[in-house]
Image (cartoon, grey):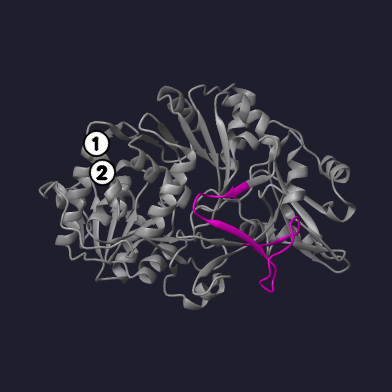
């Protein structure tokens, strides 16, 4: 039984050495090839002073090297810190300093970002993948460093309680927080996810989600655990090429977020898409609008749809049985296997069925805390209902139906209080999504002298589609109570997202500050 995360790779390569593990661009790698590279990197890191518990940052695009390097760091006994390749200099510098990173693994085209950081951190060792032999002073060639190293695993000293990863949050609410996950927490949630999704060796998973993002990272971990194949794309920057790759590779499992599903449906309206080989769809990171489901069914006629909910602090919390996807349109389902979900009020009491409460999570998949931030850790890892345990206070408001399935209501800090009434942004967004011309929508509260807060909708239309403010207000009036109808509607060409592809209320409010000032 695997005790360390890297044990899943070693177990799989022993069973299926020649099975294709990874397809990234033109590169195809077997489990044997991935393992050999990871082992050589592990030895190289040990030679550069990396020991048990030392942090190693991986600042790379979604690529075979990024994926294999994660296991290389683990085999070295280190803690991997995956950083999105779109991260800018200031944030990268913060992450490297905050985590106490010992070695940075990167690519030459990202030198424009890490170059100035290296000057500020003279003790940081940088290994950079490059075809050129000319690298900046103090930067070593990663490919040369691993070339002559042994392709067998170095001796392992870690135990399951040791840290395996620091996963930094997107930082849209201030400085990013490093979420500490042990081998134990990641292995538990990995086994739980693979149990309910049922991946097999025959599956070909597809992902364009960043590997620094929990949802994207677990596409790779799940692939390795099952002995399957991952088709890894850098992004959806060229959707037509991505969709062709999915068809050509006959992918069987597709992981995505609502933004990408919206993109696919918009593309389908202009140029029909069809993915008959896909048997399993997953959605996480944000609620999937019910209005998307008929179109998704048309694109993926053979697929079971799993709607899921999670947070970086525990990776995954809930999933909905796919048989209920079109019955419980707004539900995220029940707790993942081996865990429990509770709804509590502000006094810590269990709320009555049907009432709204703050979601609390119990299970071995909880983070160890936020790196170097004990006060913030204490705000979310709270004493449990049973003696001696802690629960994760998610900060999200949910309700539960008689079957035990959960429904997202809002972030506790996103509830809009207008006219003395509470307004759920998600409920208003769902009403606006019912308009076929709507591509994306985010609803937020803005200060209002009479209402306290006024409901404001930021809406982007599908390409070539006409959409009016009056039409949006009309559909809201038809579907919602009066106090929930947006007072303000701003039509935008596109909505801002974080580097992980999530829509962000904070970014939208910041970028639309001038327009909002004219309204308020």
Residue 418 sits inside the magenta stretch: no
- Tell me: 421 left or right of 265: right
Residue drawn where x is 58% and y is 35% of the image: 305
Q: Is residue 121 above or below residue 188?
A: below
Q: How many marks?
A: 2
233 versus 98 height, above or below? above
> Residue 15, labelled with which disc?
1
Residue 347 lies in the magenta-colored region: yes
Q: Which residue is mark 2?
A: 11
Mark 1 and mark 2 residues within 8 Å of each other at the beta carbon: yes
Between 11 and 308, the one lying in front of the other is: 11
Whether residue 168 is visible here, answered yes or no, is yes
Q: Is residue 134 visible in this depiction of the protein?
A: no
- Magenta part of the protein: which range? 333-359
Alpha carbons under labels 1 and 2: distance apart? 7 Å
Q: Percent position (x, y) of residue 145?
A: 15, 52
């Amino acid at each position: 039984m695997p005790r360390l995360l890297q044990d899943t790779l070693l177990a799989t390569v022993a069973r299926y050495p020649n099975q294709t593990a990874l397809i990234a661009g033109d590169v195809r790698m077997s489990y044997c090839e991935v393992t050999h590279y990871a082992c050589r990197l592990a030895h190289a890191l040990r030679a550069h002073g990396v020991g048990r518990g030392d942090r190693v940052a991986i600042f790379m695009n979604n690529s075979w090297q990024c994926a294999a390097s994660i296991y290389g760091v683990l085999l070295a006994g280190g803690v991997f810190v995956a950083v999105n390749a779109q991260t800018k200099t200031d944030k990268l510098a913060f992450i490297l300093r905050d985590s106490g990173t010992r070695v940075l693994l990167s690519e030459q085209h990202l030198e424009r970002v890490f170059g100035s950081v290296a000057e500020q951190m003279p003790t940081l060792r940088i290994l950079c993948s490059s075809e050129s032999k000319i690298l900046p002073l103090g930067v070593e060639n990663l490919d040369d460093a691993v070339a002559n190293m042994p392709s067998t695993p170095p001796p392992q000293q870690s135990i399951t309680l040791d840290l395996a990863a620091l996963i930094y949050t997107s930082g849209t609410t201030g400085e990013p927080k490093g979420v500490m996950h042990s081998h134990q927490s990641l292995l538990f949630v990995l086994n739980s996810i693979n149990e309910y999704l049922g991946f097999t060796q025959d599956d070909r998973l597809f992902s364009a989600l960043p590997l620094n993002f929990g949802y994207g990272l677990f596409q790779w971990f799940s692939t390795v655990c099952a002995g399957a194949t991952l088709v890894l794309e850098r992004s959806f920057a060229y959707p037509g090429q991505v969709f062709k790759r999915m068809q050509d590779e006959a992918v069987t499992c597709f992981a995505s977020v609502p933004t990408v599903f919206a993109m696919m449906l918009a593309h389908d309206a202009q140029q029909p898409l069809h993915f008959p080989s896909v048997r399993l769809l997953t959605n996480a990171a944000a609620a999937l609008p019910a209005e998307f489901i008929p179109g998704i069914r048309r694109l993926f006629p053979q697929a079971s749809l799993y709607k899921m909910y999670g947070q970086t602090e525990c990776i995954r919390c809930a999933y909905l049985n796919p048989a209920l996807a079109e019955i419980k349109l707004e539900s995220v389902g029940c707790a993942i296997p081996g865990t429990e979900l509770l709804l509590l009020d502000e006094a810590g009491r269990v709320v009555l069925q049907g009432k709204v409460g703050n979601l609390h999570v119990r299970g071995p998949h909880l983070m160890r805390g936020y790196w170097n931030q004990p006060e913030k850790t204490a705000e979310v890892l709270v004493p449990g209902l049973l003696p001696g345990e802690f629960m994760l206070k998610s900060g999200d408001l949910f309700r539960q139906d008689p079957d035990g399935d959960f429904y997202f209501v809002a972030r506790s800090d996103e509830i809009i209080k207008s006219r003395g009434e509470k307004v759920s942004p998600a409920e208003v967004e769902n009403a606006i999504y019912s308009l076929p011309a709507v591509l994306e929508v985010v609803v937020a509260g803005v200060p209002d002298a009479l209402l306290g807060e006024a409901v404001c909708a930021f809406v982007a239309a599908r390409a070539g589609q006409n959409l009016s403010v009056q039409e949006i207000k009309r559909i809201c009036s038809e579907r919602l109570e009066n106090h929930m109808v947006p007072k303000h509607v701003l039509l935008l060409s596109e909505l801002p997202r974080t580097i992980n592809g999530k829509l962000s209320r904070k970014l939208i409010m910041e970028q639309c500050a001038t327009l909002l000032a004219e309204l308020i």
